[in-house]
Image: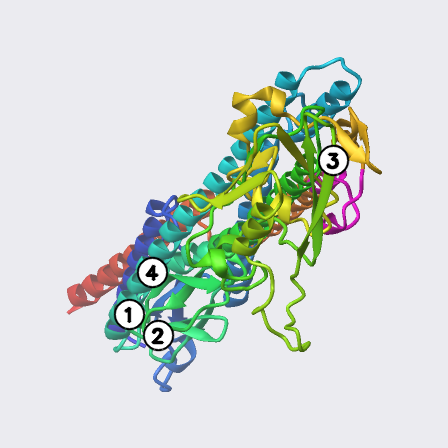
Amino acid sequence: MGLGAAFQIGRSALTASQLGVQVASNNLSNAATPGYSRQTIDLQSLPGDGSGFSGQIGRGVRFAGVRRQIDPAIEARFNASISESAAAGELLRSFSGIETTLNELTDLDLSSELGAFFTGWSELSNGTQAQPQVIQQGELLAGFIKRIRSDLTNQRNEFDQRLGSLVKDADSKLTEIARLNEQITSSEAGGAQNNPLRDQRDQLVRELSEAMDVTVIEQASGAIDVLVGSSPVVLGSKSQGLELREVPKGDSIERRVAVRSTNQVLDINSGSIGGVLESRDGPIDDTIARLDSIAGQLIFQVNSLHATGATERGLTKAESTLRFSLSDQTLALNNPANLAIKNVPVAPTNGGFLVRTKDESTGAISTTRIDIDLDGLDSAGQPSFTDDTTLSDIVADLDAISGLSATLGSDGRIKITASAGTSFTFGQDSSGVLATLGINSYFTGSDASDIDVNTDLVNNPQSLMTGRFIDDTFHENGTSLAIADLQDNGLEALGGESISSFWRTSVQKISVQTGSAKVIADSTALVRDGLESQRLALSGVDTNEESLDLLAFQKAYQGAARIIQTTNQMLDTLINLI
């Protein structure tokens, strides 16, 4: 081995040390860069040429490349934990928002308003409260229910807006990943990895994982394919694109994420998008549905009792609140094509009701039963709506009663008027048609979005039905007591629960789900943080460690320079001998 070989060893050492300083310096400069993975230099000893001593000593050091310190398994688990934590966070946000809206366990909650409403009817029955106060309490309750419904709807709309923003952002990230795929494939054609571009791409994948659960498959070219479930959304240098679509489901509209290029609807169960979808279609819609059920039953049950209630003076006129178009007026009330009945809280059934007319001069009472045929069968017993009761049939039957005049107004509502000296009341409605049509009703509307007190009562509180005929005997507080008892009466439509208990159960369900969502959010965040710590332990930059590496390479550089200096001195000595 000659002095030339020594010069070569020194030169290779200088080069390796310079590159080591560059790598350590680059790590230090990117210590706070999001997504940066620590880099290490690969150095290999150069073997000798096999002759003489050089075969045993070697020929210095060779630079073999710069590697990112990453573990693909940890990266995949970390990305999955990001998705799960993001979804759990969205669900917790949803449940917490619902709890705030309901505001239960305070004096300003629906349970308190329901209690005050039914208590008002109870106090009316024993004479400690007047009709105007009961009507005002009904207005307060209706307004409270509508406010909750509006707040829940606004919360759902906020989730819809957030969903649109998340999908748009995810689509943008897919485009950027596809662009980086193309750059990486091109730049790595010579064999060396483009670490900065790979770091950028991995960071985008992490951010994408926060939006939805994805699977990443790296190809031999260095490009990655990104899949949601089994559906590819990035293939090499081409993004398939994402878009938000509205999918009809019954009477409602669901929002789903689809692949733009294939029209395939994606099943996203995790990430912020998955959490928002579950929140919107789960707890928010469920709470709205339960509130609508309560409001619908409240409207129907109170109206059923109020419609068949009575006062000592009786009625001289009455109007329905449900409006029918001209075409619907001649369709059977159980015909699915009858749009007027489509959204009522409870549809009428086969049965009938009584109409009592009273001659005020003689006191004579006449009772007429009006049958409501809604069995869905014709006279031959075959399925048909042809001979079932229509709105026009009811008007004709009412108009045929002596002392009454019934017409259909231009607004599609029934108008009943008694002759001079005649009053009337309704009773024993087994069909529910009076409550459905809103004849002599207390409430108007069909659900929590439009519940209100009948304006006829607001304008004339004395027309409030407080009494009731029971076995042809008038009880002056019969209707008041019956409505007050609704607070505790179980209803088949609510699974055997009363209106008040059904709402309490709904609130308790939300409370339990909120607690469960918090536990899940905390646990998934703990898993995410643990995996992030593992990733950072391998891929993160430790400034103390890099400073030591920098010092080590500096010392190595000084040593390499000393090798060249010493070799040069030896060469000078040799030359001076000649």
Q: CA distance from mark 3 to mark 4?
A: 74 Å
Is the Cβ of the residue at disc 3 closer than 8 Å to that at disc 1? no
Q: Amino acid at mark 1?
A: Ile
Is the Cβ of the residue at disc 2 closer than 8 Å to that at disc 1? yes
Q: CA distance from mark 1 to mark 4?
A: 20 Å
Q: Amino acid at mark 3?
A: Ile
Q: Amino acid at mark 2?
A: Gly
Q: CA distance from mark 3 to mark 1?
A: 94 Å
| 357 lies left or right of 281 | right
Which of the two marks, 4 or 2, is nearer to us in this view?
A: 4
Residue 263, x across and y down, in percent: 37, 73
Residue 184: mark: 1
Judged from the image, the secondary structure of the residue bearing numbered disc 3 is strand
Residue 187, x across and y down, in percent: 24, 71
Residue 17, x across and y down, in percent: 32, 58
Judged from the image, the secondary structure of the residue bearing numbered disc 1 is helix
Which of the two marks, 1 or 4, is nearer to us in this view?
A: 4
Q: Which residue is mark 2?
A: 222
Judged from the image, the secondary structure of the residue bearing numbered disc 4 is helix
Q: Amino acid at mark 4?
A: Asp
If the image is split into quadrants, where does the N terminus sit?
bottom left
Which of the two marks, 3 or 4, is nearer to us in this view?
A: 3
Residue 171: mark: 4
Q: Please report whichever mark, 4 or 2, sits nearer to the chain's N-terminal start.
A: 4
* Circle 3 residues within 10 Å: few <14, some 14–19, many ≥20: some
Residue 454, x across and y down, in percent: 55, 31
